[in-house]
């Protein structure tokens, strides 16, 4: 084993390498997967790369655990590994782990290149972790691009399906557009302060060192720079006026990739926003709190209203994730110790409930029982009582009903906002979440209460989606027998049938269920973990 | 003639706005990508001008990274454009109309 303490006090290069160890492990495994893919029989290569990807994530967790007590700065102050990273790395790695578990079953029935897929997932997860730990505008730009390029490829991964390609195209154009805004914002911040490191910019603004060596108005430059930087980051967080890519790319992407985008990329974007916010925006130089305040309200309200109109489940979750981004933003605005730790808790809770919902959508999609159209979910709650109950639980958690992780997340975020005096913001957010409960519960009502006139095993797919779903023979048989027997199924036979269909998916769903429940009932350990990790934000 | 760093930033801003307009108005995928490149290069110009003025290296280093990233993005875009062309027979983005409300 490595003697960490010795290296920790040692040379600069070792320190730099140590500060990116969890990411480096993932990148090594991503290359290993590519290499192993060369020697494989193309017909059964999926298994090796799948297990290699899982082992890579496990090793990354191991290194994260070994390093978790240290604070290491590396690469000339562009990357830092601290307690804040430990929490967000955990959330990002969990999101990657759940995505990999879901992917195996999803891609078994589709003809795509498997090793490249898993290596891209590992690359994008490592990019998200780099993004969270970067404290320099160069590093932030590079990791955002690294993450986005992997995400563009993954979005368009269903080769030959026009919806997937179209989603990748729209995501690429809007994502690069956002990166250009981020870059141009950095130019003006650089012009105003002369620094690219977040902490040096922080110190510069803190000292109000405006008697610098050039003559023009630095205040204006700083304001322009901060606004453009905010636009660039808001695109990645999918806040309201900059959300346009979200529904399209969530809808067209393969469902496990949608899960990775909805959980991992959102966490990484909020992670870097929290770093930038606490170091630059928190001075409230140009009343940025008011801008963010308005953005949060618009994002929540728009997301919820648009979600109400959707008939496609993936689009509905996309719009609801826009609304969730609004709730998370409230925590950031509330700021301080309570606000940020509540935000972190919400992000972790969001991973479990969203991943669980997507795992169940994949399961129904793969059993060919339901398309992503909400109508096709009618009566599924009777035929599959266990899966239906789990799906209802995740939806209730997203809606924020008590005893779920979603409720505790909202509770921490909103109470932090009240502590900071944002009463009206909380009132509007509460109204919004009451409103949001309507469309979540609408799906549950559809599953349990609507008349069951369409046969369960029948294909009910819309707009050409069936062309790519090549169903395995045995799942067809299963669903046929369900159709024959009607709705009087016992939970036992359902469990057997689902187990034969997708062991990895079942594991993912069970993990999500357990954690959604635990975070809802005993949030104390996780919130204290979050509070401990927040302290490092201000201590560098 | 004395060229101020302000002027460089003004030119960079104009180029950036032209690029942004191009992304919003143009319909051809390749032209859109050229407009995106224009926006990136406006940032490059700004960085070079500012870091020359302040006698710092970090802006120049940033420019090299931006150029490398832009090259990587060109590769991805061309891949997406070819896939799009195979399915639709055109790279006009108006044909990307399957994902709607």
Image (cartoon, rainbow, N blue to C red):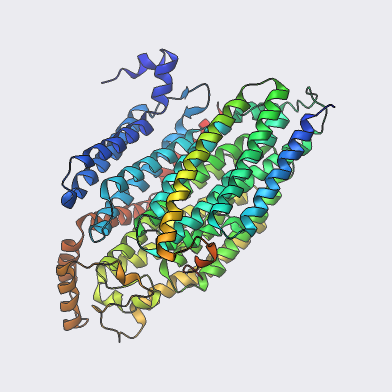
x, y (%) of residue A232? 60, 46
The one nearer the camera, A396 or A223, is: A223
Count of numbered badges drawn on the protein: 0
Q: Taking A39 as reference, is A172 above or below it? A: below
Residue A15, image x and y in percent? 42, 19
Which image quarter holds the C terminus of chain A? top right
Relative to A469, A440 lies left or right: right
Could you tell me if residue A347 is visible in this image?
Answer: no
- For the N terminus of chain A, the image quarter is top left
Quick check: A385 left or right of B73?
A: left
Q: Quadrant of residue A129?
A: top left
| Residue at image location 24% in from the left, 46% down from the top | A50
Q: Is residue A247 left or right of residue A357?
A: right
List x then y, in percent, for residue A389: 31, 68
Query: Would you say A372 lies left or right of B66 here?
Result: left
Q: Quadrant of residue A65?
A: top left
């Amino acid at each position: 084993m490595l003697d960490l303490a010795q290296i920790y006090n040692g040379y600069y290069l070792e320190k730099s390498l140590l500060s990116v160890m969890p990411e480096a492990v993932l990148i090594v495994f991503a290359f290993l997967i590519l290499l192993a893919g060369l020697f494989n029989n193309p017909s059964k290569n999926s298994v090796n790369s799948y297990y290699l990807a899982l082992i890579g994530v496990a090793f990354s967790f191991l290194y994260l655990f070994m390093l978790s007590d240290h604070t290491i700065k590396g690469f000339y102050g562009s990357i830092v590994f601290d307690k804040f990273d430990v929490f967000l790395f955990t959330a990002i790695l969990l999101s990657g782990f759940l995505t990999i578990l879901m992917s195996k079953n999803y891609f078994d029935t589709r003809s795509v290149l498997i090793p490249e897929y898993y290596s891209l997932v590992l690359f994008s997860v490592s990019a998200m972790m780099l993004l969270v730990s970067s404290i320099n505008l160069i590093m932030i730009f590079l990791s955002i691009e690294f993450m986005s390029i992997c995400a563009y490829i993954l979005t368009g991964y269903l080769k030959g399906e026009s919806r997937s390609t179209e989603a990748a195209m729209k995501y690429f154009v809007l994502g690069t557009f956002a990166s250009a805004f981020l870059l141009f914002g950095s130019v003006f911040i650089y012009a105003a302060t002369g620094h690219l490191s977040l902490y040096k910019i922080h110190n510069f603004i803190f000292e109000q060192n405006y008697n610098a060596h050039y003559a023009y108005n630095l205040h204006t430059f700083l304001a322009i720079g901060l606004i453009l930087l905010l636009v660039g980051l808001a695109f990645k967080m999918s806040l309201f006026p900059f959300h346009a890519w979200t529904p399209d790319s969530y809808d067209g992407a393969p469902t496990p990739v949608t899960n990775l985008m909805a959980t991992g990329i959102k966490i990484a974007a909020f992670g870097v926003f929290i770093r930038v916010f606490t170091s630059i925006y928190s001075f409230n130089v140009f009343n940025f709190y008011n801008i963010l305040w308005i953005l949060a309200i618009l994002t929540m309200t728009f997301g919820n209203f648009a979600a109400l109109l959707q008939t496609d489940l993936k689009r509905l979750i996309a719009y609801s994730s826009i609304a969730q981004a609004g709730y998370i933003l409230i925590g950031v605005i509330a700021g301080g110790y309570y606000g940020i730790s509540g935000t972190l808790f919400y992000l972790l809770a969001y991973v479990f409930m969203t991943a669980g919902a997507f795992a169940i959508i994949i399961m129904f999609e793969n059993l060919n029982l339901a398309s992503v159209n909400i109508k096709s979910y009618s009566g599924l709650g009777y035929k599959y009582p266990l899966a239906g109950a789990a799906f209802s639980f995740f939806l209730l958690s997203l809606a924020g009903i008590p005893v779920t992780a979603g409720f505790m997340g909202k509770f921490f975020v909103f109470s932090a906002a009240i502590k900071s005096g944002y009463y009206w913001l909380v009132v509007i957010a509460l109204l919004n979440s009451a409103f949001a409960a309507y469309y979540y519960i609408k799906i549950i009502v559809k599953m349990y209460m609507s008349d069951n006139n369409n046969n369960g095993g029948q294909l009910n797919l819309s707009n050409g989606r069936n062309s790519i779903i090549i169903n395995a023979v045995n799942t067809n048989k299963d669903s046929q027998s369900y159709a024959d027997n009607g709705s009087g199924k016992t939970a036992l036979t359902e469990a057997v049938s689902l187990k034969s269909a997708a062991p990895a998916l079942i594991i993912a769903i069970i993990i999500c269920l357990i954690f959604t429940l635990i975070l809802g009932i005993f949030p104390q350990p996780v919130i204290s973990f979050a509070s401990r990790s927040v302290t490092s934000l201000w201590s560098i | 003639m004395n060229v101020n760093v302000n002027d460089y930033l003004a030119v960079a801003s104009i180029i950036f706005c032209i690029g942004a307009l191009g992304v919003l108005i143009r319909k051809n995928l390749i032209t859109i990508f050229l407009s995106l490149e224009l926006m990136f290069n406006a940032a490059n110009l700004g960085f070079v001008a500012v870091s020359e003025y302040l006698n710092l290296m970090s802006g120049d280093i940033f420019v090299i990274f931006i150029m490398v990233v832009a090259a990587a993005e060109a590769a991805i875009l061309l891949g997406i454009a070819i896939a799009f062309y195979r399915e639709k027979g055109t790279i006009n983005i108006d044909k990307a109309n399957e994902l709607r409300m």
